[in-house]
Amino acid sequence: MRRGPSRKRSGGFTLLEVIIAFALLALALTLLLGSLSGASAQIRHADHASRAALHAQSLMAQAGVGEILQAGISEGEFSGSDYRWTLEVSPYQDPAEPARSLQPGTQRLLRLDLEVAWGEAPRERLRWQTLRLVPAQLDQQNLLP
């Protein structure tokens, strides 16, 4: 028994299958490019933050060396870069102890508050705080408030 001429199915894809494959490929590429651009933004922020930390470390190491620390605010820019800094020096008062007057010859602590910025956004600035001990002879000379 012979049947009529048989139809052979070709081994290709239908138009609908090709369109779906392209749509899936476009979706996958969109997700991949989105994650890569997010990763590059994070890398750029980490680079800026690490450079700001190096500048801050350098400035904090120089504070009080070769010059007398005095209470007040100073500002500036790091040479050859877009990084700006603001340093505030103020007497430190321990919150656990009541305010008291200092005896002559007593050492004092100064609080250094440094902010380094490289843009205008809040995310583009970092802050550091530290304490410095002022020798008693500087306090006796009334160089500090």
Image (cartoon, rainbow, N blue to C red):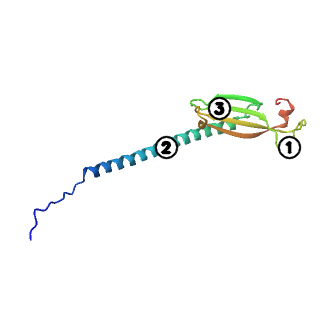
> Picture quarter containing residue 59?
top right
Mark 2 / mark 1, whichever is N-terminal: 2
Of 63 and 12, which appears nearest the observer? 12
* Amino acid type assigned to the residue bearing label 1 in the image: Glu
The residue carrying mark 2 is: 38
Residue at 61% x, 34% y: name it. 117
Mark 1 / mark 3, whichever is N-terminal: 3
* Amino acid type assigned to the residue bearing label 3 in the image: Trp
Q: Nearer the viewer, mark 3 or mark 2?
A: 2
The residue carrying mark 3 is: 85
* Amino acid type assigned to the residue bearing label 2 in the image: Gly
Mark 3, other Cα within 10 Å: few <14 / some 14–19 / many ≥20:
many
Q: Measuring from the top left, give residue 31's x and y in whole percent.
A: 43, 47
Mark 3 / mark 2, whichever is N-terminal: 2
Cα–Cα gap, marks 1 and 3: 31 Å
The residue carrying mark 1 is: 97
Number of numbered callouts drawn: 3
Q: Measuring from the top left, give residue 104's x and y in whole percent.
A: 90, 35
Residue 54 — which label?
Answer: none
Of 76 and 67, which appears nearest the observer? 76
Compared to residue 86, the image places residue 34 above or below, namely below
Cα–Cα gap, marks 2 and 1: 48 Å
Cα–Cα gap, marks 3 and 2: 28 Å
Of 76 and 27, which appears nearest the observer? 27
